[in-house]
C-alpha cells in the first residue's frame, strides 16, 4: 500500500535565500510544462524529449553556477535544491571533474547502452570531426543508438555542412576541448 502523503504540515520550509531564486526556478518550471505539453507530431521519436532534457540541463547549470562559481547560495540551500530534484546531482558531480565541464547529459557518457561500447558523438571534439576522424570515434556511415547525422543515413561526401547531433539529448557538441 502506498504511503499517505501529508498536506505539507510536516514539510520543512526552504532555507534562507530560496526566495531570491524562486522566480527563476518558476520560469524553468513553466518552460518545462510548456515543453511537456508541446505537440510532437512530425518529430522523430527520440527528438520529443530533447527540449525537456535541455531545460533540465539549464536549470541544473543555473544552480551549479550559483553555488560553485558565484557562491551566491548557501550549502543548505544547494542541498535542499538537489534533494527536492530542482537539479540533477549526477550531472553536477560530473561537471566538477576535469574533462566533463560542458557535459550535456549523463546518458552521453554511459557506454553500456551504446552499440559499440563508446561514448556519444557529441563528446568527440569538433576539430576531430572536421578532420574526418569522427568515423573512427563512432560517427560512421549508419546511425546507431548514440549518433544522428542530420539529413539521413550515409549520404557520403566528407561531412561538409552536416550537423551532427546526439540522439539522447540533441546536443551538438559538449567536449571540453571545443
Image: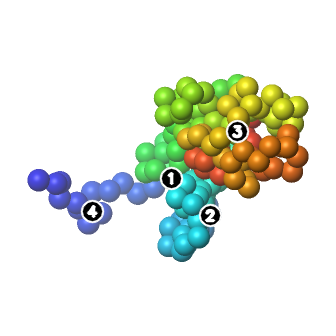
Residue 86 is tagged as 1
Mark closest to the chain's N terminus, 2 or 3: 2
Q: Relative to the observer, which residue lies in front, 79 or 40?
A: 40
- Position of 138 with respect to 19 (left or right) is right
Q: For the residues marked 4 and 1, what is the alpha-carbon distance in whole angstroms?
A: 21 Å
Specify whether residue 153 is in view.
yes
Residue in view at x 74 percent, y 55 percent:
151
Q: Secondary structure at mark 2?
A: helix
Residue in view at x 62 percent, y 31 percent:
119
Work out whether 33 lies above or below 156: below
Name the residue tied to disc 3. 141
Q: Position of residue 26 (x, y in %)?
A: 55, 67
Residue furthest toward the left?
Answer: 1
Q: Quadrant of residue 121?
A: top right
| Tags 3 and 4 touching, CB below 8 Å | no
Q: Position of residue 57 (x, y in %)?
A: 61, 50
Mark closest to the chain's N terminus, 3 or 4: 4
Residue in view at x 53 percent, y 48 percent:
87
Q: Secondary structure at mark 4?
A: loop
| Tags 2 and 3 touching, CB below 8 Å | no
| Tags 1 and 2 touching, CB below 8 Å | no
Name the residue tied to disc 2. 24
Q: Secondary structure at mark 1?
A: loop
Mark closest to the chain's N terminus, 1 or 2: 2
Q: Relative to the observer, which residue lies in front, 108 or 10?
A: 108
Q: For the residues marked 2 and 3, what is the alpha-carbon distance in whole angstroms?
A: 42 Å
Q: Position of residue 125 (x, y in %)?
A: 79, 33
Answer few, some or many: residues within 10 Å of disc 4's Cα (few below 14, many 20 plus, some between 14 and 19): few
Residue 9 is tagged as 4
Amino acid at each position: 500500500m502506498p504511503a499517505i502523503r501529508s498536506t505539507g504540515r510536516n514539510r520543512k520550509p526552504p532555507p534562507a535565500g530560496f526566495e531570491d531564486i524562486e522566480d527563476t526556478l518558476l520560469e524553468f518550471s513553466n518552460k518545462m510544462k510548456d515543453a511537456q505539453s508541446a505537440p510532437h507530431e512530425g518529430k522523430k521519436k527520440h527528438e520529443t524529449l530533447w527540449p525537456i532534457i535541455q531545460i533540465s540541463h539549464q536549470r541544473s547549470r543555473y544552480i551549479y553556477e550559483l553555488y560553485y562559481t558565484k557562491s551566491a547560495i548557501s550549502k543548505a540551500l544547494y542541498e535542499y535544491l538537489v534533494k527536492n530534484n530542482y537539479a540533477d546531482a549526477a550531472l553536477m558531480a560530473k561537471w566538477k571533474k576535469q574533462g566533463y565541464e560542458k557535459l550535456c547529459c549523463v546518458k552521453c557518457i554511459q557506454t553500456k547502452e551504446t552499440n559499440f561500447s563508446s561514448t556519444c558523438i557529441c563528446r568527440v571534439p569538433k576539430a576531430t570531426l572536421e578532420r574526418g576522424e569522427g568515423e573512427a570515434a563512432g560517427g560512421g556511415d549508419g546511425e546507431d543508438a548514440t549518433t544522428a547525422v542530420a539529413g539521413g543515413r550515409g549520404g557520403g561526401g566528407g561531412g561538409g555542412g552536416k550537423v551532427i547531433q546526439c540522439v539522447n539529448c540533441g546536443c551538438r557538441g559538449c567536449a571540453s576541448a571545443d
